[in-house]
Structures are given as structure tokens and as C-alpha cells.
Amino acid sequence: QVQLVESGGGLVQAGGSLRLSCAASGIFSVTFMGWYRQPPGKQRELVAHIISSGITNYADSVKGRFTISRDNAKNTLYLQMNSLKPEDTAVYYCNAVGKYYNGGYSRTFNGWGSGTQVTVSS
């Protein structure tokens, strides 16, 4: 069974920092991991992603403030968020694409964690 478990969200004042973690289990040969967020009343949007080669990509709104990284040994994804703004308030979700075993066969996984709330006060 594949699990993606996010942690690290919370309430922070504008200008502050948070570090989100996403622990992945039951998955291997991960080719893509990303952070998405869904602000209140809005659609889910990509924040940042990292592929197996280590190449990263960021939304324009977070460039220079957020840093995505991955610890392959721990199968854990991180998002360091600095200089937080009230508009960063959202539920943050982890997404991963890779393989998992089911019934003795390798299958493709593309799924989500349950999310962690980030609230930035002005």
C-alpha cells in the first residue's frame, strides 16, 4: 500500500518560514514528486516539482522564496518556505509518480497525500 504523509504545516506570521515534509512509503522508482496547493475557494495549483534527475521547477509566485528538495534514501520530499505571504495560505498537497507492487506485479502509482494546512497571517 502506498502512502504519502505530509507534515509541517501550521500558522505563521507574514515573513516567517515553514518546512513541509512528505514521507512516501510503499513506492519505488519515483520519477516525479511535487507540491501543490489549494487556496480557499480556488483550484489546486502547482507550487514546485522535482524529477528523478534532480531538476526542479517552481511557480512564478514562489520563485526565490520556496525550495523543493528530496532525500532519496528516506523517500521524503521537502518544501522550505521562506518569506511567507498571506496569499500563500492554502492546503498543501504532496504528489508522487512511481511504481508499487500489487499482486506480485509492478504497477504505476500517481497519487496524493491528504494535505497539510498552511496559514499565513498578516
Image (tube, helix red, strand yellow):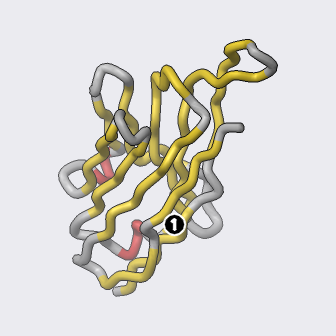
Please say if 103 is above or below 65.
Answer: above
Is residue 16 shown left or right of residue 100? left
Report the quarter where the C terminus lies: bottom left
Viewer-nearest residue: 33 or 29? 29
The residue furthest front is 104
The image shows residue 107, relative to residue 64, as above or below, that is above
Which residue: 39% across, 41% down? Answer: 74
Classify residue 6 as left or right of residue 121.
Answer: right
Q: Secondary structure at mark 1?
A: strand
What x and y, as percent, mark residue 2?
66, 38
The image shows residue 40 at horizontal and vertical percentages of 60, 69
Spot the residue most to the left: 64
Q: Position of residue 16 (x, y in %)?
A: 25, 77
Residue 50 occupies quadrant: top left
Q: Nearer the viewer, residue 15 or 31?
A: 31
Q: Is residue 5 left or right of residue 84?
A: right
Which residue lies under the disc numbered 1?
90
Please tell me which residue lies in front, 53 or 39.
53
Q: Residue 34: which quarter of the image?
A: top left
> In the rendered view of the protein, which quadrant contains the N terminus?
top right
Can you say whether 29 is above or below 34 in the image? Answer: above
Relative to 94, does residue 41 appear above or below in the rendering?
below
Q: Nearer the viewer, residue 89 or 68?
A: 68
Decide: few, some or many residues near mark 1? Use Cα within 10 Å; few <14, some 14-19, many ≥20.
Answer: many
Task: Inspect the image, locate mark 1, and give the three-letter code of the amino acid beneath it.
Answer: Ala
Where residue 66 appears, x then y in whole percent? 27, 54
Residue shown at 65% from the left, 27% from the top = 109
